[in-house]
Image (cartoon, rainbow, N blue to C red):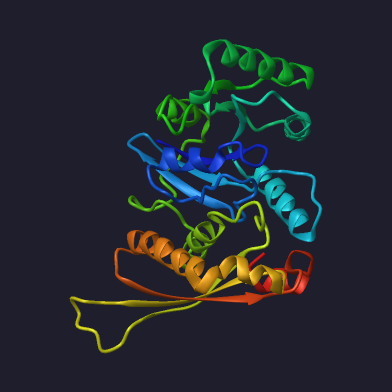
Amino acid sequence: HRAGFACFVGRPNAGKSTLTNALVGQKVAITANQPQTTRHTVRGIVHRPDAQLILVDTPGLHKPRTLLGERLNDIVRTTWAEVDVIGFCLPANEKLGPGDRFIAKELASIKKTPKIAIITKTDLVDSKTLAEQLIAIDQLGRELGFEWAEIVPVSAVGDKQVGLLADLIVPLLPEGPALYPEGDLTDEPEQVMIAELIREAALEGVRDELPHSIAVVVEEMLPREDRPADKPLLDIHAFVYIERPSQKGIIIGPKGKRLKDVGIKSRKQIEALLGTPVFLDLHVKVAKDWQRDPRQLRKLGF
């Protein structure tokens, strides 16, 4: 039996979270169509008879422009130093760019850890484009003086070769007993997962205007008192933080419609996650320029 940690790295929006969710078979990482949505190291846990694979999802490594960006990059580097396998995600439908080379160079400096190149989003290209991408990635490793342990094309959306990827990672893990109880899918605290689900719903439809300006904090979660045992209700009070007063109207929407939709959408996801009915109370607050303020970053969990 083998057990160990693997992490997926890559430019923002390279399909890391979608792949994590596909391997675990359930939504543990939030996915959105704009870059930089993952801010926490979400661990998804894949249980197999012969192995336990713990997936660490890192934020996309990028050239930072704010203190938040620098903190996210630090998280990535710390994670790389602690895992057994690194999977480098490269989308099949985009040519290798400076961002990919930047990450590959960083990877080249990590000598001992086996590195797998994962070509994601193969459902978006034809076989010729895919073949060209495979050759380019193989050459990239050689240029930088290392060899990929494997190069695997996958489509998380079409569920192609996702199982094969797990089969290839497992032999690279150390031998040992399971590290998490059977049935656990993530070690992310529930409150953090709930905040992420609300943030995902809040980003829906406003990604161009405020992709990074939204942070969500769950202030409290309490079972409603005086409810019969067979009809429990969980009260969740959460704050959606933005950076400027002018963004408030975008989040709340005309006559509060957007915020109401965010509540309805995220409530369904939260109820599915917790398996219990939820009353969700959302409020929007301004935390001025929080991405650049160390004190506010701490308060918002970074």
Question: In the image, what residue occupies the spot 59% across and 24% down?
Answer: 92
Residue 153 on image: x %, y %: 52, 22
Give the residue at the far bottom of this rendering. 226
Quadrant position of the N terminus in the picture: top left
Question: In the image, what residue occupies the spot 63% across and 12% down?
Answer: 132
Q: Is residue 6 visible?
A: no
Quadrant position of the C terminus in the picture: bottom right
Observer-nearest of 47 and 131: 131
Toward which corner of the image does residue 139 lie, by quadrant? top right
Residue 194 on image: x %, y %: 46, 64
Q: Is residue 254 left or right of residue 135?
A: left
Toward which corner of the image does residue 134 lie, by quadrant? top right
Question: In the image, what residue occupies the spot 30% across and 70% down?
Answer: 277
Observer-nearest of 241 and 188: 241
Residue 148 on image: x %, y %: 64, 21
Question: In the image, what residue occupies the spot 41% across and 29% down?
Answer: 158
Tell me: residue 208, above or below residue 67. above
Observer-nearest of 295 and 245: 245
Residue 204 on image: x %, y %: 53, 54
Q: Is residue 231 visible?
A: yes
Q: How many discs mark residues in the rendered view?
A: 0
Tell me: residue 214, above or below residue 50. below
Q: Is residue 222 left or right of residue 9?
A: left
Q: Is residue 98 left or right of residue 171?
A: right
